[in-house]
Each structure stands twice: as C-alpha cells, then as structure tokens.
Image (cartoon, rainbow, N blue to C red):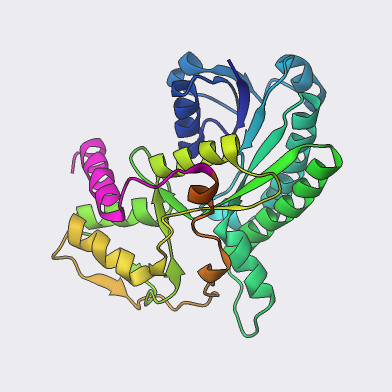
Amino acid sequence: MEKVIVAGAGGFIGKNLVTSLIQRGYEVTALDIKFDDEMKAMAKCISLVDFSKEQLVDALQEEYSCFYDLAWMGTSGSLRGDYNVQLENARITCEYVELAAKVKCSKFIYASSINEIETYEYLQSNDIQPSAGYIYGTGKLAAHLMAETVAYQNGVGFIPVIITNIYGVGEKSARLIYTSIMKLLKGEHCSFTEGYQTYDFIYISDAINSIIEVAEKGKAFNRYYIGSGEPKPLREFLMKMRDIVSPAAELGLGDIVFKGTNVDYKQFAMKQVEKDTGYVNKISFEEGIRMTADYIREEEGL
C-alpha cells in the first residue's frame, strides 16, 4: 500500500482529498493544526501544534511516495491581505519541500492558484488599483517559485496544480459561490462587478480526481490547469447560478467597480490533465450548483 502525506488535510479540499485517496487504497498521513473526529477515524493525523520541524521528521518515520501540499492560511477573509500571514505561508511551503525530500517523496504536489497568474499579470499592467487579494497572490507566487527551486535542488519532482475556483457540497467559506448561494436562498441582495472578467469553476469531486490523477501520472516540473476547461465571462456563471437557485432574484451586476486584471486563460493548456492522465470532468456547472444549493438548504434549514 502506497503511503502519502497531505498537508492542510483539515480543510474543505484537504478532507475531500484524504477521503478519495483512502478510497483508492492509499495510506494517508494527514498534517494540519486540528482535525475533526471523522478525519481522525480515517487517517493517521499529526497535529502541527504538537511537533517542531525536527520532531516532525521523526514522527513520520516512513518513506512516502507523494506529498500533497494544500496547507495555506488566509485563503479568504481579512487574512488574505495580511502580508505577515502570506509570507509565512511561503516559508512553510519551502520547509514542506525539504520535509518531503527527507521522507523520500518522489513527487510534491503544490496547490498553485489562478491568483498567482492574476498577480503576475498585474505587475505588467498600469493604472490598476491593487486589492488585498494581490498580497495573497504574491504569497502564492513566491511560494511556487521558491519551493519549485528547492524541490529541484533536493531531487523532488515538483508538480504545481493551478486551481481555479473550487466549490461544492461541504464548503462553508467566504468565497463567491457559497456566499452568493446563501444570499440568494435567503432573499438577500447580491452585489457583483459587471462580470465581464473571465472566470472558471470546477466542482470539488472533479478537482480532487484531477489532482490525484496528476500525482499518479503527471510529469514533474509541468503545470496542470485544474478547472472546467471552459472559462467564460463571470456574469454568465452568475446568471446560471441565479436561474437555478432563485430565478426571480435580481443580480447586482455592476454594483461593484472592477479594478483588477482580466486573466488571459489562453496561456493555459486546458486539456493537459486529460492528455497526460485520461481524466475527464464529470460534473457540469449547472449540476454542481444544484447539488451545492441543495446541501446549503438542508444545512441551514432554508
């Protein structure tokens, strides 16, 4: 049985990843600050609160085939714009690569982000007003570049997975899909930009399956786009979501002035996951929104 490590296992994406890995027959060691009872019953859990960096190597004690790094503080909310938090994230990422080398992981899967690309494109633009999100994006970009170099120096195969916007059953966060569905179900007004900037979304199960397939069959030092592969103006996604969740609701498109950059998705090899692994997404945006809305209705009693 292959052994793998998942850092950031207690989060929405991490928990789904651990569950899917175990279903595929992997033995998982989960790293995070805290775990719920369900996670403790599924995997070997190591709380980072209880171990120093040196002690963590001794606690692992085994050889692992892959290190999945999903650990990141401040992906949403006020911490997203806290430069101390985001710089610390970058440092920890590099330390995880060194840890992966010490426990003989041949592959390191880094949870990259579309925000890295947006931040890089912002640096090449003029007359753009930087938002707090660029601090998050800068942290992700710095972590990516430094950790990839550290991985190369230590003989670890580094594979960044560029994640767009993951949503789905089980998520409770300040991110766009969850908060918007909540407001629509409660009859509250939703405010957005005009929505002409390009966006993409992917349902959680497709994202997790893509990431695992890339870990199993992907090529080191190649980046893999994790999304639907069909990006379009944000307003098109928002209107589909509105039509499914609350058709009579009026979307506040244009309530917020868009001051960012529009990512050029043509730079990504949209079908690289399918080409290298054979995996094809199974959940459409419409189906994913229906399942997510049903989940929120049940959880919130709406």
Q: Is residue 189 visible?
A: no
**Residue at the spot x=45%, y=18% of the render?**
37
Total marks drawn?
Answer: 0
Give residue 89's position: percent from left, percent from top.
69, 45
Q: Nearer the viewer, residue 169 or 87?
A: 169
Which residue sits at x=15%, y=63%?
247
**Residue 184 image offset from top left, x and y in percent:** 23, 57
For residue 282: magenta? Answer: yes
Depth check: give the residue in front, 226 or 8. Answer: 226
Highlighted magenta segment, given as a residue range? 277-302
The C terminus, quarter of image: top left
**In the visual, does 258 lie left or right of 111?**
left
Q: Position of residue 167 (x, y in %)?
A: 39, 48
Q: Position of residue 115 (x, y in %)?
A: 58, 60
Q: To which quarter of the image does residue 253 belong? A: bottom left
Pick out the residue farthest to the left.
Answer: 248
Q: Residue furthest bottom?
A: 127
User: Residue at the spot x=73%, y=48% of the render?
Assistant: 90
Q: Residue at x 76, y 46 (%)?
A: 147
Placement of 133 over or under 156, stated as above or below: below
The vertical placement of 13 against 54, above or below, is below
Of residue 135 and residue 238, the one placed in the foreground of this image is 238
Camera sees residue 225: yes
- In the image, residue 301 lies in the stretch drawn in magenta: yes
Q: Quadrant of the N terminus?
A: top right
Horizontal side, residue 124 vs residue 285: left or right = right
Asked if 35 appears above or below 130 in the picture, the reply is above
Q: Magenta span: helix, strand or loop, mainly?
A: helix
Q: Is residue 189 left or right of residue 202?
A: left
- Determine which quarter of the picture holds residue 297: top left
Q: Is residue 281 left or right of residue 45?
A: left
